[in-house]
Amino acid sequence: MNKHILFFLAGATGCKPDMDPEEIPATEDVVEYPELDTVDAAITEIMSEDGVPGVSTCIVKDGQTAWCSGYGYANLSTELVVTPSTPFMLASVSKTITGVALMHVVETGAIGLDDPINDHLGFAVVHPEDDTPITARMLLSHTSGIDDNWNVLGSLVVDGDSPVALGDFMEGYLTPGGQWYNSSKNFLSAGVKAQNEYSNVGAALAGYLVEAVTGQDFADYCDENIFAPLQMTDTAWHLADLDEDSIAVPYDGDGSDWSAVEHYGYPDYPDGALRSGAEPIARFLTMFASGGTLDGTTILAADTVEEMQTVHYPSLNENQGLIWYSWQFNGETITGHNGGDYGVSTEIGISNDGVGFVVLMNGEGKYNTLSDIEEVLMEAAAEL
């Protein structure tokens, strides 16, 4: 989902123009992966044709990260090359971590999927035209009736991290009298559980629900219960927790006139502001594909992972699970999530037989750029 593109206000500066595929660097990996020359050639060609400065990507297979590589530049002005560990803004792929974090709390028994969220929040969220209690299941399946008011969301995008606390934003957006409350624009007129409508704010509220139930900051909860156990280094929700010079700079443009975008943030950060590299995200994806456990470390129970991939409201959307959703790709069913924000485009996915991909780009590319790269990766996976 292209989250804040129309409303983004941060500055941009001109950078070097398009590169010949022969000039796009493919970085050497710290971990020794197989050499895939045909993949290197295909990805660099796609990058050149579609105007993408940098790509970080991995292949997942047989319960492990089978291959990773970086291409192009994380920063054109400094000629910082992309590696598999270079942090990229994940955009809406971030929601998969948010969903896993909330389900991790559900497993503790502190909240049930069908508990009214108002039993746990410090404020009441009530649809202005429908008093049906909103539940965690609804938040995670985009059926809560909470809508994205882009006039508000766009106005709160800032350079750097947002100064507005997650809980303050949620209360101000969702309760009458709140600073950003609008009964007609912040909620769907159809009501609660009446339609499946992708909701960034609903996903962010799922992140805040983790805070409300545990009493722990959402970002800290993810660090302690997901990132550290999975050894996901250089992964953080806030720019302040990373070395900004190491993060892939988002770029606007088509390759002939790239413009660097300042690193930015927003108060609803659990729906899109995670930064991480392809390699750590591949570990997260492998954990999920392996029933919630990786290298002896269990993040979720296998039945919880299965529940996240289950369609809970098939009459509203036959592909939507709990945050994770499915689609058809070259005759295979893929489960995962995509993401798009100003200057970034991302996607992760795993097939039913456990073969998957991570693709992170610091440019928006074209409509089919992600799928073209993914086709290359899935074909290569068959040979690994």
Image (cartoon, rainbow, N blue to C red):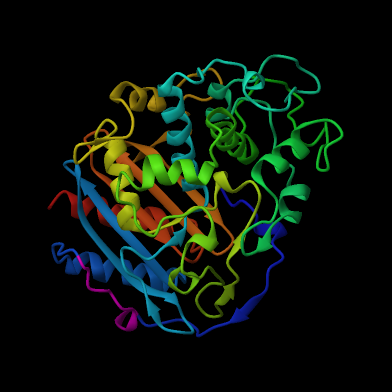
Q: Position of residue 278 (x, y in %)?
A: 34, 57
The magenta segment: 21-30
Q: Position of residue 271 (x, y in %)?
A: 56, 44
Q: Is residue 125 left or right of 138 when viewed as pictured?
A: right
User: Residue 203 appears in which quarter of the rendering?
Assistant: top right
Q: Is residue 335 visible?
A: yes
Q: Residue at x 37, y 56 (%)?
A: 359
Give the camera-side residue of 119 and 149.
119
Q: How many tags in the picture?
A: 0
Q: Residue at x 64, y 20 (%)?
A: 134
Q: Is residue 107 left or right of 89 when viewed as pictured?
A: left
Most frequent secondary structure within the magenta stretch? loop
99 vs 228: above or below: above
Is 246 in the magenta? no
Q: Residue at x 30, y 82 (%)?
A: 22
Q: Is residue 330 visible?
A: no
24 vs 35: above or below: below
User: Residue 85 appears in which quarter of the rendering?
Assistant: bottom left
Is 22 in the magenta? yes
Q: Is residue 358 left or right of 4 when viewed as pictured?
A: left
Q: In the orientation shown, which residue stands out farthest toward the front?
A: 215
Q: Position of residue 136 (x, y in %)?
A: 55, 24
Q: Position of residue 170 (x, y in %)?
A: 70, 38
Give the camera-side residue of 225 and 27.
225
Q: Residue at x 19, y 41 (%)?
A: 295
41 vs 378: above or below: below
